[in-house]
Image (cartoon, rainbow, N blue to C red):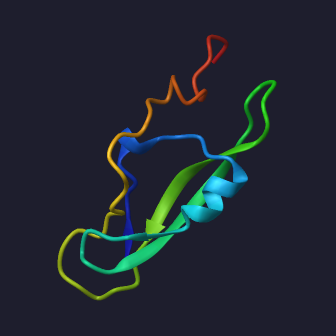
Amino acid sequence: MDGAIPMDHVEVLDAVRRDADRVVLCRCGGFGRVHHVPVQRRGLAEGYVRGSFTCPWDRPGPHVPLLPPGGRSRARAGLLTADR
């Protein structure tokens, strides 16, 4: 089952943090896979953001990743710039 990534968890990850972020717990009690999308940031190395989440467990409850509290806003993550 596919689930949405909460928008308060938009954060640009480097390749190492992306790899560590691939398998996470699901709110249904199972675990699933986070799919990342590459982003280009002017003058910075390529980063990755969480794009979608897939939980294969057939359990009741929301299939949403259980991510650490916090997250960064899109502007602070470097995704929004003045020329966009």
Q: Is residue 73 left or right of residue 83?
A: left
Rendered-image quadrant of the C terminus: top right
Residue found at x 40% / y 84%: 56
Location of residue 16 in the rendering, given as x and y in whole percent from the top left corner: 69, 56
Rendered-image quadrant of the N terminus: bottom left
Location of residue 63 in the rendering, given as x and y in whole percent from the top left corner: 30, 70
The residue most toward the bottom is 58
In depth, the one of 34 and 21 nearer the eye is: 21
32 is higher (above) or lower (below) than 48: below
* Residue 65 location, quadrant: bottom left
Q: Is residue 63 left or right of residue 22?
A: left
Residue found at x 62% / y 11%: 82
The residue most toward the left is 60
54 is higher (above) or lower (below) than 76: below
Location of residue 60 in the rendering, given as x and y in whole percent from the top left corner: 18, 81
Residue found at x 61% / y 46%: 13
* Residue 42 location, quadrant: top right
Location of residue 28 in the rendering, given as x and y in whole percent from the top left corner: 24, 75
Residue found at x 71% / y 54%: 15
* Residue 45 location, quadrant: top right
Number of on-image labels: 0
